[in-house]
Image: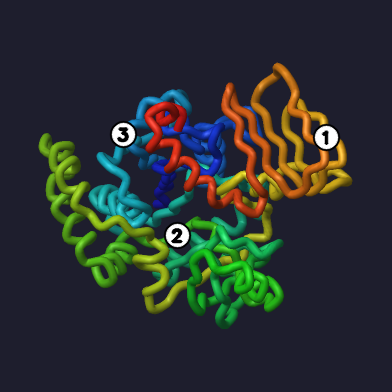
Amino acid sequence: MVYKIVMAGGKGERLWPLSRRKRPKQMLSIFSKQPMIKETYNRVEAIFQHGPVWVITGKEHLTQIKKSLPKAKNLRVIAEPVGRNTAACIGLAAILIEYDDPNGIMVALPSDHYIEDGPKFKNALIEAVAQADHFNSIVTIGIWPTYPSTGYGYLELGSRVGYGHVERSCRVYAIEKFIEKPTYEAAQGFLKSGKFLWNSGIFVWRVSRILDEIKQHIPALYAGLQKIKKHIGTSTFSNTLEKAYKTLPNISIDYGVMERCRESFTVIGNFRWSDVGAWASLEDIFSIDREGNVVVGPAILSKTRNSIIFSDSKKGVIGIHGLDNVVVVKSGEEVLVCRKDKSQEVKELIAKLSRDKKFSHLT
């Protein structure tokens, strides 16, 4: 059986002021009327309609998650006591699935990405499941880059293993190596070479295989997960999870496993995708006017080019004159202004706000 895992523990600090601690990125409705967490749930549930959907989130967001998915079928929400990055999140999901089905196939998706729905996404995911099932493979979905992003991870393509096992329209390649968030110069080289894909962060594998990889490459995480596993299905599970989870290593699945595993594969996804990781990502999603601007919400622009203007307010207007390559965002009473090429660095501003007693409540 295919088990769907939605990773919903992120904060989305780079999307301040729209995203806050109490309103993280996955709860935002940026490109549709529904929050991104619901878009993700609907997308994967429509493809694999049997079996539960596990949502792994932070305990501070548990209530919001349940409110966002009030009519979701077969929903199982697990709250992490503390954030411990994606390796711990995936490991926790794996031992919970293993308890019910040691041979289960896990499809792990971030909760806060933009994905163009349709047959191309469906085919890529079905093919990834087939590869993981038939060959016990570690599989991710890669996306052809459209610009030299420094905010995404990359996959270097190795040899082609042929057309898809199930979906003949899909191409499958061995992964030569993973590269996390390169410099701009390196990203330019990746784009020109035609041998690199963006890592979408969508992973597919048998639970037994990913647990074996965690055991080999992150033994401290594996040991902690085994302590938790012993208490699944008992009255002591919650208390053990609370205590043991805090001791788990804080490392991403990309650094902890994907960069170290001996063999992995990617299915090329020929669909529009963005991790909406910073305000500059809106150029991947919304239409761009003749001057290169993305405008969402009430705004008037004059002699302004290659900029992103966003407002979630129906009142008032943002006026911009004589600026190029800027991001201007208004949410409530808060306003962000930054250079577009610095939008990945907004977390530095949030850290400064958090340290200021006058403004820490705004983060």
Q: Is mark 1 on a helix, strand or loop?
A: strand
**Residue ranking furthest to the top:** 315
**Is 302 situated above or below 102?**
above
Q: In this view, does 61 lie to the left or right of 34?
A: left
From where the camera sits, is residue 127 visible?
A: no
Residue 215 x, y percent position in the rendering:
24, 67
Q: Which numbered mark, 3 or 2, is in the foreground of this view?
A: 3
Q: How crowded is mark 3: few (under 14 residues within 10 Å), some or many (20 or more)?
A: some
In this orientation, does residue 76 appear?
yes
Residue type at tag 3: Lys
Mark 2 falls on what kind of element? strand
Q: Which of marks 1 and 3 is nearer the N terminus?
A: 3
**Spatial separation of the CA atoms under disc 1 and disc 3:** 42 Å
Q: Which residue is label 3 attached to?
A: 59
For marks 3 and 2 on the same chain, the one whose residue lies earlier in the sequence = 3
* Residue 342 percent coordinates (x, y): 61, 52
Q: Which numbered tag is attached to residue 167? A: none
Residue that mark 2 sits on? 204
Residue pictured at 54% horizontal, 37% vertical: 16
Q: What residue is rendered at 45% in x and 73% in y?
A: 264
Q: What residue type is labelled 2?
A: Val
Q: Which of 201 and 296 is in front in this view?
A: 296
Circle 1 or circle 3, nearest the eye: 1
Residue 309 horizontal/vertical position (percent): 72, 37
Q: Is residue 266 left or right of residue 351?
A: right
Front tag of 2 and 1: 1
The residue pinned by badge 1 equals 301
